[in-house]
C-alpha cells in the first residue's frame, strides 16, 4: 500500500463506552457484562523499559466488545477471579495480536490456563495477508488505520490521559473487529 493510499485511509477509534476499572468494586460492577461476552478483543499495555535489564509488570488489561471497552488498571485490582473465569472459558473467544507474551506476563500476576485465545497473526497467515501487526492488518483488512502514538507512554502513571484511554480501547476493539473479519 503506497503512502498516498495510507494517508487517505479512514482513521478508526473505538466508538463505544470506555470503562476505566481501578478497584475491585468497579470490576465487580462490570463483571456480568464481561462474563456474558462470547467474543472479546484482548490486549495489554506495559510501561516501556529503556534500560537493559529493566522490566515492568503489565499495567493495563484491555478487553473489548462491540460496544464496551474495559480498561483494567492491574496495579489497583486484587481480585482476579473474573479474569481467570474468562481466560479459562473455552466458549469465549479472546483475540489479539502477539498475545503469547501478554499471556505469560499476566500469568506472573495471577495463575490461569489460557483457553480459546486467538492469535490474529495466525489468521493473517492463513489468509495470506502481507501484514501481521495490528496497524498493518487494520489497513489491509479493514481499509482504515489506527493511532500508534501513545504505545510507549507511561501506562503506570497515576492518571491516564484521554489519548491513552482511547488508544487502549481502540487496540482491543480492533482485535475483535479483525477477528470477526478474518475468522474462517
Image (cartoon, grey):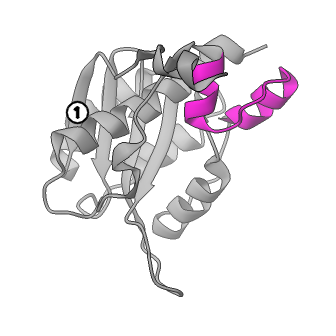
In-front residue for pair 107/156: 156
| Residue 120 covered by magenta stretch | yes
Q: Quadrant of the C terminus?
A: top right
Asked which secondary structure carries label 1, the reply is strand
Question: Which residue, given by chain and number where applicable, does mark 1 sit on?
Answer: 19
In the picture, measured across the screen, residue 91 lies left or right of residue 123, that is left
User: How many neighbours does mark 1 have within 10 angstroms: few (below 14), some (14-19), or many (20 or more)?
Assistant: some
Task: Give coordinates of residue 155: x percent, y percent.
Answer: 30, 59
Asked if one can make out residue 28 in the rendered structure from this viewpoint, the answer is no
The residue under the point 67% across, 40% down is 115
The residue under the point 44% across, 28% down is 146
Task: Give coordinates of residue 14: x percent, y percent.
Answer: 34, 22
Task: Give coordinates of residue 85: x percent, y percent.
Answer: 50, 42
Q: Which residues are magenta?
A: 118-140
Asked if one can make out residue 18 in the rendered structure from this viewpoint, the answer is yes
| Corner quadrant of residue 120 | top right
In the picture, measured across the screen, residue 111 lies left or right of residue 165, that is right
In-front residue for pair 126/31: 126
In the picture, measured across the screen, residue 70 lies left or right of residue 119, that is left
The residue under the point 49% across, 25% down is 174
Task: Give coordinates of residue 148: x percent, y percent.
Answer: 43, 41
The residue under the point 72% across, 16% down is 183
Name the main secondary structure of what is drawn in magenta.
helix
* Above or below for 89 versus 38: below
Q: Residue furthest front?
A: 4
* Above or below for 148 versus 107: above
Amino acid at each position: 500500500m503506497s503512502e498516498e493510499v495510507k494517508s487517505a485511509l479512514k482513521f478508526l477509534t473505538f466508538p463505544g463506552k470506555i470503562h476505566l476499572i481501578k478497584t475491585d468494586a468497579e470490576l465487580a460492577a462490570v463483571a456480568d457484562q464481561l462474563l456474558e461476552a462470547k467474543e472479546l478483543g484482548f490486549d495489554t499495555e506495559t510501561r516501556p523499559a529503556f534500560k537493559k535489564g529493566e522490566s515492568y509488570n503489565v499495567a493495563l488489561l484491555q478487553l473489548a466488545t462491540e460496544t464496551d471497552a474495559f480498561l483494567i488498571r492491574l496495579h489497583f485490582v486484587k481480585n482476579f477471579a473474573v479474569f481467570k473465569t474468562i481466560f479459562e472459558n473455552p466458549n469465549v473467544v479472546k483475540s489479539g495480536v502477539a498475545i503469547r507474551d501478554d499471556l505469560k506476563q499476566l500469568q506472573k500476576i495471577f495463575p490461569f490456563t489460557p483457553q480459546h485465545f486467538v492469535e490474529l497473526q495466525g489468521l493473517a497467515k492463513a489468509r495470506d495477508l502481507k501484514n501481521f501487526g495490528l496497524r498493518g492488518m487494520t489497513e489491509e483488512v479493514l481499509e482504515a488505520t489506527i493511532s500508534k502514538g501513545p504505545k510507549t507512554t507511561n501506562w503506570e502513571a497515576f492518571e491516564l490521559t484521554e489519548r491513552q484511554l482511547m488508544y487502549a480501547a481502540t487496540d482491543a476493539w480492533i482485535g475483535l473487529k479483525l477477528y470477526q473479519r478474518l475468522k474462517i
